[in-house]
Image (spheres, rainbow, N blue to C red):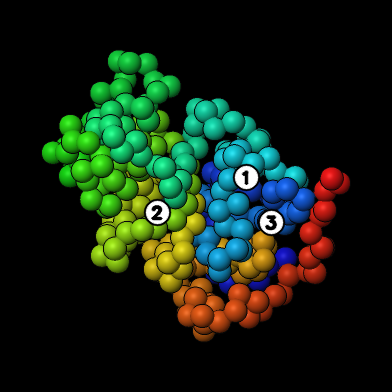
Amino acid sequence: MPTSLDSHAERPSRLRVEQLDAGYGHGLIINGVDVSVGAGELVAVIGPNGAGKSTLLKAITGQIKPEGGRVYLDDRDVTSLRGDRLARAGIGYVPQAKDVFRTLTVRENLELGGYTLPRRDVEGRIEGVLETFPILRGLIDRRVNKLSGGERKMVAIGRVLMLEPATIMMDEPTAGLASDLADVVLREHIPRLTSRGAAVLLVEQKALEALSVADRGYVMVGGSVRITGSGSELLARPDIREIFLGIRGDSVPDTSTPRPEPVKRPL
């Protein structure tokens, strides 16, 4: 079991992942991962490159089929559901890349985000997105490829908000953004989602910055969760800071039970 540093009581889970195993080809990338996120809570998943963070999101969102374990949304088993069914169930996903249609306008992107809605509801949902991100109101008819990186990220998040998901997963939302824009995304845009009551699971390579705004965090190393705790507790640990200042990922103390060797699938 991973070390838990969290002295704060967890909120009732909206998203719960239990003992999830997943990978590609002939071996597992993540092994026995447990993660939970409560309503109105921002939870960060951090770890060195290759730790399995993006694989975790892909397994939760049905992009790859888990080899073991379960995913629950409000106690409903949604393991391996297709993306469209997950969206209807209340899970939104903002990928790291290809998160907007660059040749379309802001309005057209938002309309596509509401593709499952009755037409009469689309305008109301667009208005809700514009209330969350007021700057997009003046850009509504501009093509997305004419926007700044930060503005495009708002459109990407807005597309997900069109279906008013109760749970939102974000994969590296600051990737490719300048430092000041990345700070705005982490400190302004994402907290707006939790203030609306959404449960947000954030995978972020800017680990220290993510922990500074997160309610809780999970540290993944080698495909497993090694340490959990509140954002402030994790930030206070010297070894957590060391791992993201160039020290090898295996320098994080492993207090979990021994992991089995990666499962090899028959050819």
**Within 10 Å of the Cα at label 2, are there few (<14), some (14-19), or many (20+) other Cα atoms?**
many
Residue at the (40%, 54%) spot, across then down: 173
> How far apart, in angstroms, are the residues tagged by discs 1 and 3?
11 Å
How far across and how far down the image is residue 148, in percent?
23, 50
Q: Amino acid at mark 1?
A: Ala
Instruction: State which quadrant residue 186 falls in.
Output: bottom left
Instruction: Work out which quarter of the rendered image holds the C terminus and state it.
Output: top right
**Within 10 Å of the Cα at label 3, are there few (<14), some (14-19), or many (20+) other Cα atoms?**
many
Relative to 139, is 155 on the left or the right? right
Q: Amino acid at mark 2?
A: Pro
How far across and how far down the image is residue 182, in percent?
32, 61
Closest to the observer: 121 or 59?
59
Location of mark 2 (residue): 173
Closest to the camera, between mark 1 and mark 3, is 3
Name the mark on residue 29. 3
Instruction: State which quadrant residue 123 falls in.
Output: top left
